[in-house]
Each structure stands twice: as structure tokens, then as C-alpha cells.
Amino acid sequence: MQLEYKNYGETGPPVIILHGLLGSSKNWHTAARKLAEECRVTVPSLRNHGGSPHGRHGLDEMVGDVLHWLDQQDVSRVFLLGHSMGGMVAMALACRYPERLQGLVVVDISPVNHLNPMLPTFAALESVSLERIKRREDADNQLAQAISSPFVRQFLLQNLKRTEEGTYVWQCNLPELSRFVREEKQFFLQPSDRFTGATLFIGGGRSEHRLEDQHTAIQRHFPQSTLVMIPVAGHWVHFEALQPFLDATLAFIHKVQSAPGEP
């Protein structure tokens, strides 16, 4: 599967960013542009998101897509950064193909978190009557009945696309993503899965994922990991606390780059 992607920056260590559920490459534009001041950043849209092709949605499939993309681009080792669902993909890829990573950054997800908290969000999106939408504000008004946060609604509505005929459709593969969330009960790392390379977990202090309570599980699978909590942030850490997120990420990359034996 040929993924849509965007590149930022021309020098520095390669950083691949994997977005979360219902996101896309454009959701990371601001953070990627800032990281690109010191790194070569690429942000693909995962399958069924953004402008990437649609197909069966699963963690195995996404890992395969990212690995295929790395091979196509002739990229041997990268810093892999994943948020939420993208973090699940990044963790799995790190455990299976550790030789492809210089370092791993996982944002507000842990090896034991699952996707069930997203069920109300999908119910809200599926309740939107697309035929009643004449402008984006109409969709926002419909979503506001179930989702009070304007920030969350703005994020979700980036999936809404206006056609040449003037109607609106979901650009993401909403039915397949909804199926995925309902059937994917928990993360799929096996007890023996390990990534012993440098790993940073970044958690939002206001997030329901509560990474600070997952220390045992995180250390079991990622024994060389550290955890940075950003108290003012919720789940969308890179939106809600951009500078602290950048500071933590760049400090980790610099530390790994300066370690003995690293290029």
C-alpha cells in the first residue's frame, strides 16, 4: 500500500511520525515543522486515513505498511514517534524489527491501553447526517450535541471533505475504522515481546490513558524506557502542550545521538 506522506526539513536525524486514530499527516504539521529545525521529519497518513488508500484496518497491516514505506525510501534506521494508535504501531514495529530504529518515542499510549474509549467518538461521527451539511459549521453543530469540546470537534472535522459537487463526505474510511475499534479489544504485544533500545514515553497528565500507572507493563516490554509526564496536557499532547512536547522529544533524540556507538 502506497501511503500519502509529507516531508519536513533536509538535515539531521530521520524522524518518522505516526499519527493517531482519525488523524492524518496534516494533524502533525505544526509539530513536524518545529522538529524539522533540527531533524528530517516525515509524516505518513496511515491506511484508511487522510489521502492514503483504504483497506482492511489492523495493527499487523499498519506495521507492514510502515516497514514497506521505509524499504521504498531506502531508510535503514530512524527515530520512530507514534501517538495513540500510531504509538501502538510504533511499539509493535520496534519489537519485531529493532534493527530499524535508532530510538522510539511513544506518545500517550501504553502496551496495555485499548481503543474502547473511542467508541463514543465513533458513535458521534456516525450520527452526523452528511446530506444535511451545507457548510462545515453544520457538521460542527451536529457533533456538538455529543462532543462538547470545540478542540476535539475541530480535530475530528479535519476528516470531512467537500466534493466537487459541493456535498460532504468522510475522507477517512469511517466504517472500517469503526469496525476496527469495536473488534480490537486490547493491544497485541506478546508477553515475550521486547525492545531494548532507547525509548521515551510521553504522557498527558490530564489524559484518561494514565501512563503514570502503567510503569510495570511499560518496563516489561521496554526496559530501557523513560517516562515524561506533561501535567497540562490531555491525550493530544502535541497540540495542547507543544513546547514541552518538543523539548522532551528533542532532548531524547540528542541524548541518543550523543551516546557511544551512535552515528
Image: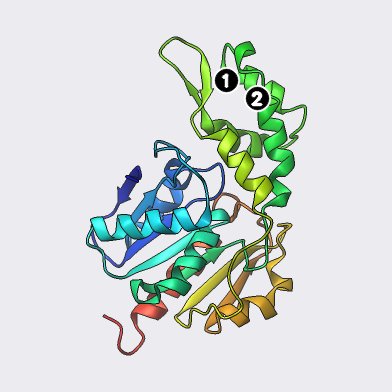
Q: Quadrant of residue 211?
A: bottom right
Residue for badge 2:
140
Would you say 61 lies left or right of 223 here? left
Between residue 131 and residue 59, name the one nearer to us: 59
> Which residue, as the protein is rendered here, is positioned at the far bottom?
260
Mark yes or no: residue 251 visible: no
Question: Residue 221, position in %: x, y?
Answer: 57, 78
| Residue under numbered circle 1 | 136
Q: Where's the C terminus, which quadrant?
A: bottom left
Question: Alpha carbon of mark 1 to alpha carbon of mark 2: how far?
Answer: 6 Å
Please report contact status of discs 1 and 2: CB closer than 8 Å, yes or no: yes
Compared to 38, does 7 lie above or below? Answer: above
Residue depicted at 57% across the width and 70% down the height: 201
Closest to the observer, 8 or 55: 55
Kind of residue indicated by mark 2 = Asp
* Residue at 56% over, 49% down: 239
Within-10-Å neighbours for mark 2: few <14, some 14–19, many 20+:
some
In this rendering, would 155 be left or right of 165?
right
- Classify 157 as above or below 49: above
Residue 214 found in image quarter: bottom right
Left or right side of 261 for 21: right
Under circle 2, the secondary element is helix
Q: Out of 48 and 56, give the one closest to the viewer.
A: 56
Q: Is residue 17 visible?
A: yes
Amino acid type of the residue tagged 1 in the rendering = Arg
Q: Position of residue 28 (x, y in %)?
A: 46, 48
Residue 85 in the image: x percent, y percent?
A: 56, 54
| Picture residue at 38% right of the left edge, 51% below the top | 43
Looking at the rendered structure, which numbered label has been put on residue 202? none
Residue 108 location, x and y as percent? 61, 61
